[in-house]
Image (spheres, rainbow, N blue to C red):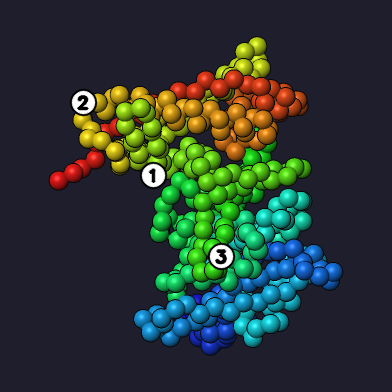
Amino acid sequence: MKVNIKLLVTILVIASFLTGCGFKDIDNRIFVTGIGIDPSENEEGKYKVTLKLAIPVSTIQQEKEPSYQYLVHEGDNIEEAVRILETHTDKTLEFGHTKIILVNEKLLEGDIKEFMDYLFRRGDIQTIAWVGAAKPTAEEILRTEPKGESAVISPLSKFFGNVGTESPYIVSTYLYEFRRSFYSEGIDAVLPIVESNESGSQLIVNKSIIVKEKRDSFHLSSSLTRDFNALANNIGGYSVKLETDELNLVLNLINVNMKYNVNKKNDQPASIKVNVKMDGVVSQSDKRLHVENLDEYSKLASKEIKSELEKLFTMLQEEELDPFGFGLKYRTMQLYEKDMFDKWEQAYPNLPFDLTVDVSLKSTGTIQ
């Protein structure tokens, strides 16, 4: 027994001096913070891949602005391009901090499976990376460095990660969420559109795009993006302007909640019941307001918002798009049948919406 213990101790001591062949020091790694995918600009490949690399700094306090390196290569597929880009630096490319994936919006018009499959299969970025549609190009958006950008975090991470600005105009979609919605029957994937201003010094994120297999992508304007995002993700900050013969109001709806259900008749989808509740305050008015009239203002707001949402739902039906997942809800309501989803697709464009909107204003604002 004593001999075995001595042998074990000897093995442990020797093993402690051995260097693992798979480990590489952090000094030999460089972190990829963003990936951009564009159509190829020449005939040598299909895609142009841009990697945004964070250059290490000695101390954050001494860095007045962030420092990045950009690697660009064109290839027939994403894997090939990344492998070639590994030869453009003397350090190992580390994707464990890649939080931004930008895809040129033109690529979303075709078959996205061919180039997105590589990203879907990477376990190191599936749950941390956000996906966005870039306009005009992914490379240009990745190279945009707004003034005041931190040396340790990408500005797009602040847009999507709720660590900076929070707005119903900004849609946030993780890579795994995009894959799940794209491949699921009964719901369509939605991505934010990321643009830059004319000078290329500022990022703008206030529109979105619906991506559906076997059809062209559909763009949502800023107002439609706000309506969808506020309802689908229960995001506050929903602003509404009310105009009557007597007064003009601007409301800030802080809390938004939407619940819906698919009603069936004779085992067929018959209608979609949607209940929307909002509460907030009056943020602007052209006349003096009285607290006792809040119920009246709330009813006016309910009527106005209901009219806007009815237009949104009708438009989505006409385009045969379902970003809210009404079809997914219908699938969960019954046992699987071979032609179950075919019945839904045939019925959805003509289903009536039973929409109820209840707005509750809590205050006319604070004036001292």
Q: What element carries label 3?
A: loop
Q: Are marks 2 and 3 in contact (CB under 8 Å)?
A: no
Q: How crowded is mark 2: few (under 14 residues within 10 Å), some or many (20 or more)?
A: few
Q: Would you name the residue on which mark 3 appears?
A: 198
> Could you tell me which residue is drawn at 20 percent across and 42 percent down?
366
Labels 3 and 1: the sequence-earlier one: 3
Q: In this view, does 154 lie to the left or right of 298?
A: right
- In this rendering, the answer to whether 213 lies above or below 93 is above
Q: Which of marks 2 and 1 is nearer the N terminus?
A: 1
Residue depicted at 70% across the width and 64% down the height: 38
Question: Between marks 3 and 1, how big is the CA–CA gap?
Answer: 27 Å
Asked which quadrant contains residue 36, the reply is: bottom right
Residue 169 at x, y = what percent? 48, 48
The amino acid marked with disc number 1 is Gly
Spatial CA distance of label 2 from label 1 is: 24 Å
Q: What residue is at 44 percent from the left and 72 percent from the top?
A: 147
Comparing labels 2 and 1, the label whose residue is closer to the camera:
2
Q: Where is residue 76 in the image (x, y as percent from the top left)?
A: 80, 66
Please state if 226 lies on the left or on the right of 32 as rendered: left
Residue 107 visible? The answer is yes
Drawn side of residue 229 relative to residue 141, left or right: left
Left or right: where 159 falls relative to 368:
right
Location of residue 243 by image quarter:
top left
Q: Residue at x 75, y 42 (%)?
A: 215
Say above or below: 66 vs 97.
below
User: What residue is disc 2 on?
Assistant: 292
Q: What element carries label 1?
A: loop
Q: In the rendered image, which residue does mark 1 sit on?
A: 237
Q: Nearer the viewer, residue 76 or 338?
A: 76
Query: What x and y, as percent, mark residue 159?
Result: 47, 58
- Amino acid type assigned to the residue bearing label 3 in the image: Glu
